Image (tube, rainbow, N blue to C red):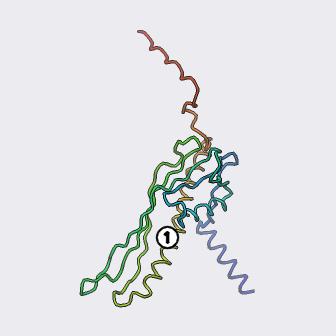
Amino acid sequence: MTRILLALVLVLGLAGCGFHLRNKLMLPTDTAPVKVVSTAPYSELVKLLNRSLLASGARLADEDSKEPSTQLQVLSERWGDLPIAIDSQGRAQEYSLRYAVIFIFRREDGSELVPQQVIELSRDYVSPPTDATGTTTEREILANELRREMSASIIRRIDSVVRAEIEKGGSLSAPKDKPVEGAEPAEPVPAAKH
């Protein structure tokens, strides 16, 4: 009985503070399949993005398919270790692991739905110069955590743009003011004479 009461108090407390579970990415049903394109096509980030898109209900484009697809392009992935604390002998004791990704999300016609953006994440870790055995493992764990967080951040950015487009009545297909390929351009309207 105590557990049920405690669970109820926690749920009411979370509801009262405005906490809501995040909705997953919702792409319209008429959206073309999504292809994740990267300079490193077999990277862990690409695998995580594909998994996240599948979990969100998106259809993934086949690698060999000629069918038009929306594209999530990962333009750049950068890692860096920045020393943030040194010991009395000038050796680094603590580092900031930094991870930056530049991406863009394109409609099936190649126009930008989510313009080029940069997301940078970082985590600090201790690395005593005298005992570096556990440091590599800690850094790998942090790197995996940053990749998962990066994938979630990219999906959230795409989701916010898609939801804004849907709310204002737009779609993920080509913008209406963009001329369709092969269509004749409209003739210019003559200027009014005074």
- Quadrant in the picture for the N terminus: bottom right
Residue at (51%, 57%) from the top-left corner?
Answer: 38
Where in the figure is residue 62, as x and y percent of width and height? 65, 53
The residue lying furthest to the bottom in this view is: 130
Residue at (62%, 69%) from the top-left corner?
Answer: 16
Where in the figure is residue 63, as x and y percent of width and height? 62, 53
Q: Quadrant of residue 177?
A: top right
- 10 Å crowding of disc 1: few (<14), some (14-19), many (20+): many
Kindly identify which residue carries mark 1. 146
Q: Is residue 66 above or below residue 189?
A: below
Q: Is residue 64 above or below residue 54?
A: above
Residue at (64%, 77%) from the top-left corner?
Answer: 10
Q: Circle 1 — which element? A: helix
Q: Is residue 99 left or right of residue 148?
A: left
Where in the figure is residue 169, as x and y percent of width and height? 62, 41
Depth check: give the residue in front, 7 or 93: 93
Name the amino acid type tagged 1.
Leu
Where in the figure is residue 188, as x and y percent of width and height? 49, 18
